[in-house]
Image (tube, rainbow, N blue to C red):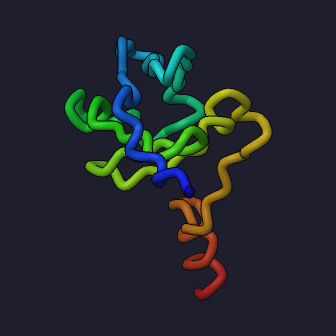
């Protein structure tokens, strides 16, 4: 006899506090700090956008209002997951315009 598939995690993830530096997230029995410096997608988000978090599996968190996916390991060890943007910033655009002249 096969066991039934595991259901959705009902305990979920919960934001327990928000400060000007970041927010605390309770996932199972572990509290994680998500600093805005390391995770800039949350810097200008509203309280309701930050607190609307889903925990689809033990290693993954999702903020549907912000369309942000994070591995729990990236919160524990952000130094192992450097932010790399493929979108050129304002300085890059200025250099391109200068070269084009």
Image quarter in which the C terminus is found: bottom right
Residue lying furthest front in this view? Answer: 1
4 and 68: which one is in front?
Answer: 4
Q: Choose between 12 and 82: the one closer to the eye.
A: 12
Residue at (40, 33) in percent of width and height: 43
Which part of the image, by quadrant, shows the N terminus?
Answer: bottom right
Vertical placement of 29 versus 54: above or below?
Answer: above
Residue 66, relative to residue 51: is it above or below?
below
Residue 10 % position (x, y): 34, 32
- How many numbered marks are there? 0
Q: Residue furthest bottom?
A: 100
Residue furthest to the left in view is 48
Residue at 36%, 21% in the rendered image: 15
Residue 83: % across, % down: 66, 49
94 with respect to 13 (left or right):
right
For residue 84, above or below residue 19 = below
Residue 47, given in percent of the width and then of the height, sits at 24, 27
Quarter occupied by residue 54: top left
Residue drawn at x 37%, y 26% as measured from the top left = 11
Q: Nearer the viewer, residue 39 or 10?
A: 10
Quadrant of residue 81 within the rendered picture: top right
């Amino acid at each position: 006899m096969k066991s039934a598939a595991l259901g959705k995690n009902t305990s979920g993830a919960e934001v327990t506090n928000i400060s000007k530096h970041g927010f605390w997230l309770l996932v199972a029995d572990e509290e994680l700090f998500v600093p805005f410096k390391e995770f800039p997608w949350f810097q200008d988000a509203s309280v309701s956008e930050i607190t609307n978090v889903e925990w689809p599996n033990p290693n993954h968190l999702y903020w549907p209002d912000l369309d942000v996916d994070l591995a729990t390991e990236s919160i524990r060890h952000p130094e192992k997951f450097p932010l790399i943007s493929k979108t050129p910033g304002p300085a890059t655009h200025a250099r391109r315009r200068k070269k084009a002249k």
